[in-house]
Image (cartoon, rainbow, N blue to C red):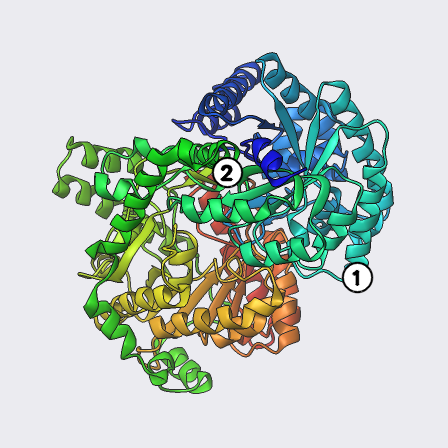
C-alpha cells in the first residue's frame, strides 16, 4: 500500500476509557452494594449504563472503533484471572456460591479469607490484583464478561474491539500462590494457558468481533531470551489459529526493544505501539525490522498518562514518518485513558487561560480524532484545530506561572552537603533512643486515621460556606483529640494526629504550594473504588508558609508521647501529580524538596522529634528499563535527603512505602538514609523483611503486620505470627510494629479492633524476647 492509501485508511481509536462516570456513579453503586443499599441487579444496571454512555461519547466524538472489555468493577487483571479460571483455592467456594460476591472477596478479602496481593501496574499509580498461580493451576475459559460487553456495543451499532490482557503479560505479572515454592515461574504455564485464550478468541469471533486487542505491556521491560521466546511461541500459536478474529498486539509505557522484532515477525494482524514515551526508539526499531508490511499499525501519539495538550504538529510529523511502514496506520492515545480524568471542561475553578493547556480523556479523544482526520484527509482539513493548538502551546510556554527566578536560583545554589545528615546513622540512632525512650518493637501507625462521613461533610460545608473557618477548625480539633485519646488508650508508642484536615496526601500539600493547580472533578482510579484527584504541577514550586506545623503541634500538646509530623515526599508529590513535561523531572523534584525542607525544619523547631516523609511512589516511578534507572534513582534519593538532611541528629526521620515490589530498589532505600522505614508486608508475607536482611539494611524498619486495604480485622495471633517472621530477618532493636499503610479508607470499628490486636501482638512478642526484662 502506498503512503497515500495508508493515510486514507487512518482511523481513530482508544484502548480504554475512565470507568467511574462523570459523578463517580460506579464507585457509589459498588460501595452501596457492599453496604447492602444497592442490589446486584441495580449495580449491573449502573455499570451497563456507564458503558453505554462511554461508547456513545467516543463514537459521537469520531472514534471509529470503541474498546470493550476494559470496563471493570474492580480491576482488569482480576477480570483476566476470572476469564482464565485462575481462582485461588481459598476463594473457590465463594465464587461458586455467588460470582459477584466471590469476585469482591478476591479483591478485598473477608474476615476469614485473605484477598489477593495488590501492587502497582507498571510505573503508574493504578493498582492491580496479583494472580496467584502454581504447578497445579488448571485454567478454564470463561468469556462471559468479554462476550456480553462486546454484544452490548454491537447492539448500539458500533464498531467494537475487545481489549484483553495478553497471556505473556498475565503470567509475568503473576506470583507463586501461597504454599508454592518461591522459585516457581508462572511463565512455565504458558502452554497450559494458550488454549484458554484460543477458546476466548473463538467465542469473541462468534459474538461478532472483527479485531481483538491483546495488551502486552510487560514486553517493554527488560526481558530474558527465555521470556522473549515465550512471546514468540504465544503469538505463533495464537496467530496461526483458524477460528479467531484479527489480533492486534499492544504495548505501551516504554520502548519495546528486543521484543519488537518478535512481535513484528509474529503471524498476527497488527501492532499498537507507544510513540510518546518512546517515540524515537520505537520508530527506529520499527524501521530497522522493515516495518509491518501487510499489517495494521496503531500509533499511540497522544499521551494517555498526562494531561497536557498534544503538540498536534509534532504528532502529525511522527504519523507522516510512519506512513509506508505498515499496510494501515491508525491513530490512538498511547495507552488506556483510564489514567487521566474524564473531562477538563468540568473544571470551573481553573483560569480559562490555563484550562486551554489541559486535555483530559474527552479532550484526548478529540485530539486523536483530529490527528486521524489530518492524516487521512490532509492538514488543510484541520487548520483551525492546528492554529488553536499552536496558540495553547505558546500560551503555556510564555506564561509567568511556569518560571520563578527565585526558585530557580535557590535550586542552583544547592550543594552536595545539603543532601547529607550531619552525623552517620549509628550516632544518630543512639541520640534518638536516648531522646525518645521507646521500648523494643515500638508501635505506631502510618499516619492517617479514618476519614469519616462527618469529616467529609464538614469539609464540603466549609467549601460551600455553610460553616465558617472557625467552625471547621473546631471540628478538626475534636477529631484530633479523639484520635490522640484512642491511641493513648490502645497503647501505641509513637502517635499521629490522624490527618483529619487533609483531603489527600498529595493534594493537601499541592493546594498550599505555589506552582500547583488543584482540580474539583479530576478523579482517577487508584484501585477498586478508591479514586484520587492528582493535582497538576504547572510551574515552579515554593512554600509560602508552614503547612502542617499548627495541627501537629496541637496534637503534641495533648500527649506526652511523641507525635509524628507527617509529610509527603518529593518523588511522591511528582508521581501522584500530573507533572510538568517542559523540564527534567529531577529539576522539579529539587524544587519540591526544598519547599518540603522548609516544612521539616519548621516542624523540628516547633518541637516535633519524629518526622515521617512518605515516599510510596519511589518504586512506582522506577523506569521500566534497567538502563534508565541509575539516573532516576540518583535524583530521587537526593531529593529525599535534600528534604530531610537539615535536622538535628536526635530528630528521627521516618519514611513509608507501600504496595510495590521493593526487592530491586533496596539499595535506593538504603541511600535515602532515613532512620526508620515502614513498608507493606502483610499480603506478601514479610517478603520485604527478607529482602532488607539479604541486602544488609542497617537501619530500623517496620514491615506491616496489618493489611489495611481489606476490611478484615487481623487477629492478635495473626499479627504476632507476622511479627515473628519479621524478627527472623530484622533484629528486635531495629524492628517496628505498624500497619501496611494509612487508615484513611477504613472505618472506625475495624480500625479500633485491628490496632488493639496489633498492640497486643507487639506486647506478646516483646514478652518473648530475651531482653524484654
The residue under label 1 is 225
Left or right: residue 341 compared with residue 144: left
Q: Mark 1 or mark 2: which comes first in sequence?
A: 1
Q: Is residue 296 visible?
A: yes
Vertical arrangement, residue 271 with respect to residue 705, above or below: above
In-front residue for pair 228/86: 228
Q: Label 2: few (<14), some or many (≥20) within 10 Å?
A: many
Residue 68 x/y as whole percent: 61, 27
Image marks 1 and 2: residues in contact by CB distance under 8 Å? no
Left or right: residue 256 compared with residue 384: right
Numbered disc 2: secondary structure:
helix
Numbered disc 1: secondary structure:
helix
On the rendered image, what quadrant is the N terminus found in? top right
Residue, x 47% and y 66% (percent of image)?
A: 442
Residue 92 x/y as whole percent: 75, 32
In the rendering, which numbered label is found on residue 625? none
Q: Quadrant of residue 160?
A: top right
In-front residue for pair 480/535: 535
Vertical arrangement, residue 665 with respect to residue 189, above or below: below
Mark 1 or 2: in front is 1
In-front residue for pair 203/741: 203
The residue under label 2 is 338
Amino acid at each position: 500500500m502506498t503512503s497515500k492509501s495508508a493515510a486514507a485508511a487512518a482511523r481513530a481509536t482508544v484502548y480504554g476509557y475512565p470507568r467511574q462516570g462523570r459523578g463517580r456513579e460506579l464507585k457509589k453503586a459498588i460501595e452501596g452494594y457492599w453496604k447492602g443499599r444497592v442490589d446486584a441487579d441495580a449495580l449491573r444496571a449502573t455499570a451497563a449504563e456507564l458503558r453505554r454512555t462511554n461508547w456513545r461519547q467516543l463514537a459521537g466524538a469520531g472514534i471509529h472503533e470503541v474498546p470493550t472489555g476494559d470496563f471493570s468493577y474492580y480491576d482488569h487483571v482480576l477480570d483476566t484471572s476470572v476469564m482464565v479460571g485462575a481462582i485461588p483455592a481459598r476463594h473457590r467456594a465463594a465464587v461458586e456460591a455467588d460470582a459477584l460476591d466471590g469476585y469482591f472477596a478476591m479483591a478485598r478479602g473477608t474476615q476469614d479469607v485473605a484477598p489477593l496481593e495488590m501492587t502497582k501496574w507498571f510505573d503508574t499509580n493504578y493498582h492491580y490484583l496479583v494472580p496467584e498461580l502454581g504447578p497445579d493451576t488448571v485454567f478454564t475459559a470463561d468469556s462471559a464478561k468479554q462476550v456480553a460487553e462486546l454484544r452490548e456495543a454491537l447492539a448500539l451499532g458500533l464498531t467494537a474491539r475487545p481489549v484483553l490482557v495478553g497471556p505473556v503479560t498475565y503470567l509475568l505479572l503473576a506470583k507463586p500462590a501461597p504454599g508454592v515454592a518461591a522459585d516457581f515461574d508462572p511463565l512455565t504455564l504458558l502452554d497450559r494457558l494458550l488454549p484458554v485464550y484460543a477458546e476466548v478468541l473463538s467465542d469473541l469471533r462468534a459474538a461478532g468481533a472483527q479485531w481483538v486487542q491483546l495488551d502486552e505491556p510487560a514486553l517493554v521491560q527488560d526481558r530474558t531470551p527465555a521470556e522473549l521466546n515465550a512471546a514468540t511461541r504465544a503469538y505463533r500459536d495464537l496467530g496461526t489459529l483458524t477460528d479467531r478474529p484479527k489480533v492486534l498486539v499492544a504495548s505501551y509505557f516504554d520502548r519495546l526493544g528486543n521484543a519488537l522484532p518478535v512481535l513484528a515477525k509474529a503471524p498476527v494482524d497488527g501492532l499498537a505501539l507507544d510513540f510518546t514515551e518512546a517515540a524515537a526508539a520505537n520508530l527506529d526499531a520499527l524501521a530497522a525490522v522493515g516495518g509491518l508490511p501487510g499489517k495494521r499499525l496503531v500509533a499511540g501519539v497522544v499521551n494517555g498518562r498526562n494531561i497536557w495538550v498534544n503538540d498536534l504538529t509534532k504528532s502529525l510529523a511522527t504519523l507522516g514518518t510512519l506512513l509506508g511502514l505498515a499496510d494501515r496506520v491508525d491513530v490512538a492515545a498511547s495507552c488506556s485513558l483510564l489514567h487521566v480524568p474524564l473531562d477538563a471542561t468540568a473544571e470551573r475553578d481553573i483560569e480559562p487561560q490555563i484550562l486551554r493547556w489541559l486535555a483530559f480523556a474527552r479532550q484526548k479523544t478529540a485530539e486523536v480524532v483530529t490527528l486521524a482526520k489530518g492524516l487521512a484527509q490532509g492538514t488543510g482539513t484541520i487548520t483551525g484545530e492546528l492554529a488553536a493548538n499552536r496558540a495553547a502551546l505558546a500560551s503555556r510556554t510564555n506564561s509567568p506561572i511556569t518560571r520563578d527566578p527565585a526558585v530557580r536560583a535557590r535550586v542552583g545554589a544547592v550543594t552536595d552537603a545539603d543532601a547529607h545528615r550531619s552525623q552517620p546513622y549509628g550516632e544518630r540512632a543512639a541520640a534518638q533512643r536516648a531522646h525518645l525512650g521507646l521500648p523494643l518493637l515500638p508501635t505506631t501507625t502510618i499516619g492517617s486515621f479514618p476519614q469519616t462521613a462527618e469529616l467529609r461533610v464538614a469539609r464540603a460545608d466549609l467549601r460551600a460556606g455553610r460553616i465558617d473557618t472557625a467552625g471547621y477548625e473546631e471540628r478538626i480539633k475534636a477529631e484530633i483529640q479523639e484520635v490522640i485519646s484512642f491511641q493513648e488508650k490502645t497503647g501505641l508508642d509513637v502517635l499521629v494526629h490522624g490527618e483529619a484536615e487533609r483531603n489527600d496526601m498529595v493534594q493537601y500539600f499541592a493546594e498550599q504550594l505555589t506552582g500547583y493547580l488543584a482540580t474539583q472533578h479530576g478523579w482517577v482510579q487508584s484501585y477498586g473504588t478508591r479514586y484520587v484527584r492528582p493535582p497538576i504541577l504547572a510551574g515552579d514550586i515554593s512554600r509560602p508558609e508552614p503547612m502542617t506545623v499548627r495541627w501537629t503541634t496541637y496534637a503534641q500538646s495533648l500527649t506526652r508521647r511523641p507525635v509524628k509530623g507527617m509529610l509527603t515526599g518529593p518523588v511522591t508529590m511528582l508521581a501522584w501529580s500530573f507533572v510538568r513535561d517542559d523540564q527534567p523531572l529531577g529539576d522539579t523534584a529539587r524544587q519540591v524538596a526544598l519547599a518540603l525542607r522548609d516544612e521539616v525544619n519548621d516542624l523540628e523547631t516547633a518541637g516535633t522529634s519524629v518526622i515521617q516523609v512518605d515516599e510510596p511512589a519511589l518504586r512506582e516511578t522506577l523506569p521500566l528499563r534497567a538502563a534508565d534507572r541509575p539516573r532516576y534513582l540518583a535524583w530521587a534519593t537526593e531529593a529525599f535527603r535534600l528534604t530531610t538532611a537539615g535536622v538535628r541528629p536526635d530528630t528521627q526521620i521516618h519514611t513509608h512505602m507501600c504496595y510495590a515490589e521493593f526487592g530491586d530498589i533496596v539499595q535506593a532505600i538504603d541511600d535515602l538514609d532515613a532512620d526508620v522505614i515502614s513498608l507493606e508486608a502483610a499480603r506478601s508475607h514479610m517478603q520485604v523483611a527478607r529482602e532488607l536482611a539479604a541486602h544488609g539494611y542497617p537501619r530500623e524498619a517496620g514491615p506491616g503486620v496489618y493489611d489495611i486495604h481489606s476490611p478484615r480485622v487481623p487477629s492478635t495471633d495473626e499479627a504476632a505470627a507476622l511479627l515473628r517472621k519479621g524478627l527472623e530477618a530484622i533484629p528486635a532493636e531495629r524492628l517496628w510494629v505498624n500497619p501496611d499503610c494509612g487508615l484513611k479508607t477504613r472505618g472506625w470499628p475495624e480500625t479500633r479492633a485491628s490496632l488493639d490486636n496489633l498492640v497486643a501482638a507487639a506486647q506478646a512478642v516483646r514478652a518473648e524476647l530475651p531482653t524484654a526484662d
